[in-house]
Image (spheres, grey):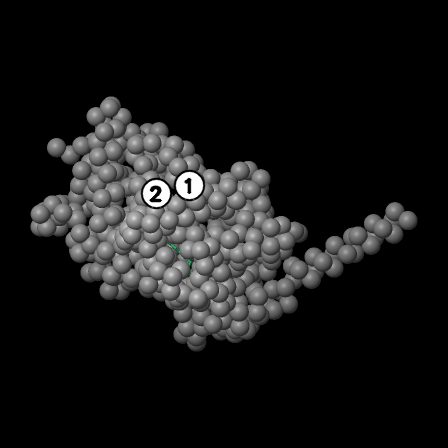
Amino acid sequence: MFVVLLIFVVTLLYVLYKRTFEYWKRRNVPGPEPTFLVGHIGESFLGKKSLGNCFFEIYKEYKDYPFVGVYKSVTPCLLVRDPEFLKCIYVKNFKSFMNNEMFVDKKVDPVMGRNPFFSKDQAWKETRALLTPNFTTGKMKTIFTLLDNVSQKAVSYVNKQIDSGVNCLEAKNLCTKITLENVASCAFGLEANCFNDPNCDFQDIANKFLSPEKWQSLKIFVSMIIPSLMKVLSIRFISKEVAERLRKIVFDTVDYREKNNVQRPDFLQSMMQLKDSTKDFDPEDMVAHAASFFGDGYETSSIVMSFLLYEIAKHPEVQDKLRQEINDTMDGNGGKLTYDVIMEMEYLDACLNGKISKNPFVESLSKRCTEKFSYKPANTSEFKDIDVTVDVGTVMVIPVKGLFLDPKYFDEPDKFIPARFLKENRKNDRSQGVFRPFGDGPRVCIGQKFGLLQIKAAVAHIIRAFSVSVNSKTKEPLEFDPWYLMLSPIGGLWLDFHKIK
Ligand code: HEM
C-alpha cells in the first residue's frame, strides 16, 4: 500500500513539475533550468539575494536575448531585455500590459486597495484620472513653499545637532524626518514635529507603515512571490491599527477645517473637494487617498535623498561643483529657493539621475499581460531572432537594475558620474528608452514631480549650509537588506556634517 502511495505521489509531483516548469520550453523561449518549487528565486527565499538581484543575474547571463523565460517560484514570467519590447509594454501597446502584477482588494485593505499602484482595469483608470490633477506643475508650484519651509527646518535641525556636539547623522533617518514633514504638511496640512520629537505620531505611524511585525512581513513577502495569496489569506499591507490612526488624523483635520472654514493649497483640500463634488467618492476614498499619499510620498523619496547625500559626500569634486551651482542660482535670487530656481539647477538634476542610475531603488517591476501580444525583434536588432506570444495573465518582469547597470547603455554604469546626465553629454545617449526611473506611459509614477522636488529642495539647502563626508560607521562596500521591499543599506548611511562658514 505504502509503495503504491509513494509511486502515486512521485508521479503526481513529476506531472506537476513538467506542467509548471516546462511552460517556457513548450513555447521555445530560452531560459535557465528552474529548481523545483522555488524556480529562479531560491536565493531570495533564503534571504541571500533580493528578488531584483535574482533577476539581475539572469539579465546578465542572457545578454544576446530579447527576453528570457523565468519562474518566480511556480509562476512563469517573461523577463524583458529588449528596449523596443519595453517600449511596447510601457507605451505603444499599453492596453496589453495595463495592470501591475500585484493587486490589492479594497475590501481587505481599504487603504492600499485604493492606491493606483495596486488597482487594476477600470478602477485604476478612474482613480488615476481623479488623482492626476493633484500632481500638475501648477500644483507643485503652489506647494513649493511648504517644501522649502521644511528644508529650512532641516538645516536648523542639523545646526542644532552640531551645536550640541553631534556631527555624525544617519542619512536615511534625517531624510525620513524631512519627507515625513513634507507629506504631513502637503497631505494633511499638519506639522509632524519629527525634528523636535523622534517619537512623534507620524514617525511612529511610519515605523509601523513599512516595517510591520515579523509575521506580517513574511506574509507580504510570500504574497509578492504569489500575489494571488493576498486575497486568499486576507493579507493587508497596512495594518488595521495604522489605517485607524490615519483615518482619525484625516477626519479630525477635515472636521477642524470644515468648522473653522480653513482653506489650504494641499492634497487633503483637493480630496475634500472631490468628496463634495464627485458621485461615488465617499469619505473612505478621501481617507485612503490621503493615507496613500503619505505612504507613497515619504519612503521612496527619503531612500533616494539619503543615497544622493551619500554619493555627494563620497565625491568631494561633485560636491564642490554642486555647491557652486546652488550658491550661484540662489544668490542670483536674493538667497531664496523657489520652484523656478530649483528648475534652473541642471547639475543638481544630473546628480540625482546619477544616483538613481547607479542604485535604482526599485530593482525590478512586474506587469501583467491584459491582452494577447506577440513580439519579434526587428531585423536590424542586435538581439537573437526569436519570437514569443504572451497570453493574458502572464507576468512580465522589467529588470530595472539589469538595464541601468548594463555597460551597453552606460560606460562604467556602477560609478556615480553625474556629468553623463548633462544636456550637452546626452546627444549620443545610448540609454534613451532604457533609463526610466519613474516608469513610463500612462502608469508612469504619478508623484514623480513631487518626489523630485522634495529631494532637490532639501539637498540644495543642506549642501549650501554644510559640507558632508562619509563617516567610518558606514559599512562599505554597502550591502543591502534582501528582505526589504526597496533599497535598504545594512547598518545605515552615516555622514559627517560641518557648517560652511
Ligand atoms: C524619487 C522618488 C520616486 C521614485 C523613484 C518612484 C518610482 C516609481 C516607479 C518606478 C513606479 C512604477 C511605474 C510603472 O509601473 O511603470 C511608480 C509608481 C507610482 N508612484 Fe512613484 N516614485 C517616487 C516617488 C513617488 C511619490 C512622492 C509619490 C506620491 C506622492 C509616488 C506615487 C506613485 C504611485 C501612486 C504609483 C502608481 C502609479 C500607477 O500605477 O498609476 N511615487 N513610482
Tag 1's secondary structure? Answer: helix
Q: Nearer the viewer, residue 223 or 467?
A: 223
Residue 218 to residue 31: above or below: above
Type of amino acid under label 1: Ala
Is the residue under label 1 in contact with that under label 2 (CB below 8 Å)?
yes
Percent position (x, y) of residue 102? 52, 57
Q: Answer with left or right where residue 336 lies relative to residue 77.
A: left
Q: Nearer the viewer, residue 64 or 12?
A: 12
Tag 2's secondary structure? Answer: helix
* First reached walking from the N terminus: tag 2 or tag 1: 2
Residue that numbered label 2 is attached to: 180
Percent position (x, y) of residue 277? 38, 64
Mark 1 CB within 8 Å of ligand 1: no
Mark 2 CB within 8 Å of ligand 1: no
Residue 239 to residue 135: above or below: above
Q: Residue 206, which numbered label?
A: 1
Q: Residue lying farthest top?
A: 165
Percent position (x, y) of residue 120? 50, 64
Q: Residue lying farthest right?
A: 1
Name the residue: 74% across, 56% down. Answer: 14
Q: Answer with left or right where residue 419 lies relative to residue 134.
A: left
Q: Nearer the viewer, residue 64 or 136?
A: 136
Type of amino acid under label 2: Leu
* Ligand 1: quadrant of the figure: bottom left
Q: Nearer the viewer, residue 185 or 18?
A: 185
